[in-house]
């Protein structure tokens, strides 16, 4: 788009409007938009497709894109709700397992700190109902040599991803 104009505000306003609509027409690449020349108030302008029909086509295209984005957002929100519901169900199953299992179940982070522990494990570690095992390590409960042994074993498991199977462990209180 180009324009030669005199310096008056009506022309400047017209120029801004023309550039805006021409940009929209170019952005949407309408095939039915011809090149046209026009002259208004001493302003000669080359326009690409800024006609009543192309403006209507632009508005139709904008509505289609907005509807498409709305559908995409609604689909994403629906998926999010489904996943949140499934996650809530899985969390409920884990909570029931943790609360009712007589076996020790606990989770540790990469630094071997407890992040979750079930009731059976808490009892074995002499953790009362108003106390927490969270953020503690084996060094808080075992003698230094035993805590070091447990730490090395856990770090090896985390490094290799291989579990320790068929090993009898002694419990030190």
Image (cartoon, rainbow, N blue to C red):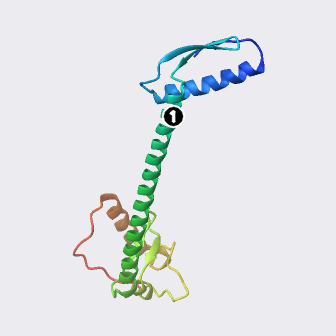
Residue drawn at 37 percent across, 77 percent down? 94
Q: Residue furthest right?
A: 8
Residue 116 image-quadrant placement: bottom left
SS at badge 1: helix
Percent position of residue 122, x then y: 44, 85
The C terminus appears in which quarter of the rendering? bottom left
Q: Foreground: 165 or 8?
A: 8
Is 85 situated left or right of 20 in this image? left
Q: Which residue is mark 1?
A: 56
Percent position of residue 7, x then y: 77, 14
Q: Residue furthest front?
A: 52
Reply above or below: 35 against 20. above
Residue drawn at 47 percent across, 19 percent down? 34
Residue 100 image-quadrant placement: bottom left
Q: Foreground: 85 or 138?
A: 85
Percent position of residue 88, x then y: 42, 73
Q: Foreground: 12 or 160?
A: 12
Q: Residue furthest left?
A: 166
Q: Foreground: 166 or 92?
A: 92
Residue drawn at 57 percent across, 16 percent down? 1
């Amino acid at each position: 788009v180009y324009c030669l104009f005199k310096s008056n505000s009506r022309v400047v306003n017209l120029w801004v409007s023309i550039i805006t609509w021409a940009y929209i027409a170019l952005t949407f690449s309408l095939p039915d938009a011809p090149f046209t020349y026009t002259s208004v108030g001493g302003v000669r302008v080359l326009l690409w497709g800024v006609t009543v029909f192309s403006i209507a086509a632009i508005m139709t295209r904008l509505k289609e894109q907005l509807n498409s984005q709305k559908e995409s957002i609604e689909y994403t929100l629906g998926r999010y709700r489904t996943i949140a519901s499934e996650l809530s169900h899985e969390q409920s199953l884990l909570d029931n397992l943790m609360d009712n299992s007589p076996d020790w179940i606990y989770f540790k982070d990469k630094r071997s700190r407890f992040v979750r522990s079930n009731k059976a494990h808490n009892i074995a570690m002499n953790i009362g109902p108003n106390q927490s095992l969270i953020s503690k390590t084996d060094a808080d409960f075992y003698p230094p040599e035993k805590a070091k042994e447990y730490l090395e074993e856990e770090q090896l498991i985390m490094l290799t991803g291989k579990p320790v199977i068929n090993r009898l462990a002694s419990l030190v209180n």
